[in-house]
Image (tube, helix red, strand yellow):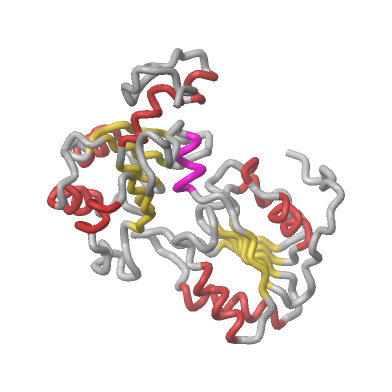
Amino acid sequence: MTTQAPLPDHNWPVMEPGWVWLCGAGPGDPGLLTLHALNALRQADVVIYDALVQQDILQWAPQADHVYAGKRGGKPSAKQRDISLRLVDLAREGKRVLRLKGGDPFVFGRGGEEAQTLVQHGIQVRIIPGISAGIGGLAYAGIPVTHRDVNQSVTFVTGHDQSGNTPGSLDWASISKGSQVIVIYMGMKHIAQIAAKLMEAGRSIHEPVAVVSTATTDEQRALETTLGSIVEDIDAAGMEPPAIICVGKSVLMRQALDWQAQAAGEAPRNLDPLDRGRPAESA
């Protein structure tokens, strides 16, 4: 990997001393970084990075101190308060601080809390969005999060709350009835409870479900199953977090759109997985 490829001509923002830029690093593949993220990496004095940020990405900031601040469920993790206040302290030292978070910082990434802390302490911030795993990770598995023959709505939910439990504030019955496709972040630990709530609310035990772990990386794995079998199949396949879970008929599209398998020489399993009975280009 080269760290010196020139950026195209553009009025790129300058990271000033004492500023903190909150930046999404995307779901894993370094190629999914934005150019604004690359520009930030090249200017930072300190990079505070999360557990899901690939080490390859940090090579684009060889001049910076790299400080790990990962939070992973069930494992020793830095406290959120300590992370937020560390950003404040570094900015007050006059450092150019890059807070690098997996996916998008404002999608279940606590970016909103960190940015608010900084603003409350008088620190200037810049927000750089990133590709969220709920979209990009599924796309790498060949699953379109929307498809005109499947859904006109999609709901993104988190599988656990601040206490680590299934979010009690979520109305699973309404989600089940109101959203054709449901994308669940950080749901592996409580998938048995989540699946049960969805089926209790009327979702079929045969509804297609996909689990994509370590999405967009060389270690990516994808499991296709159903809502009624997901718990047993996850266990049998040895699937582990981090993973994104998709519930809905759009999962069937992977039979036609598993582009990584096709690039490796496999034929599509089904050219018409939704049984439309007509070419995809037809109205």
Name the image quarter holding residue 212.
top left
Q: Which residue is drawn at 19% across and 36% down?
A: 229
Residue 56 appears at what percent x and percent y? Answer: 64, 45
Q: Which residue is drawn at 31% across and 61% down?
A: 160
Q: Is residue 59 magenta?
A: no
Q: Is residue 25 left or right of residue 38?
A: left
Q: Give the range drawn in magenta.
A: 133-140
Residue 283 appears at what percent x and percent y? Answer: 45, 27
Q: In this view, does 266 lie to the left or right of 25?
A: left
Q: Is residue 13 left or right of residue 159?
A: right
Question: Relative to 242, does residue 237 appear above or below in the rendering?
Answer: above
Question: Relative to 76, does residue 61 appear above or below in the rendering?
Answer: above
Residue 67 appears at what percent x and percent y? Answer: 61, 64
Q: Which of 169 and 231 is in front in this view?
A: 169
Q: Is the magenta stretch mostly helix, strand or loop?
A: helix
Q: Nearer the viewer, residue 241 or 104?
A: 104
Q: Is residue 173 left or right of residue 136?
A: left
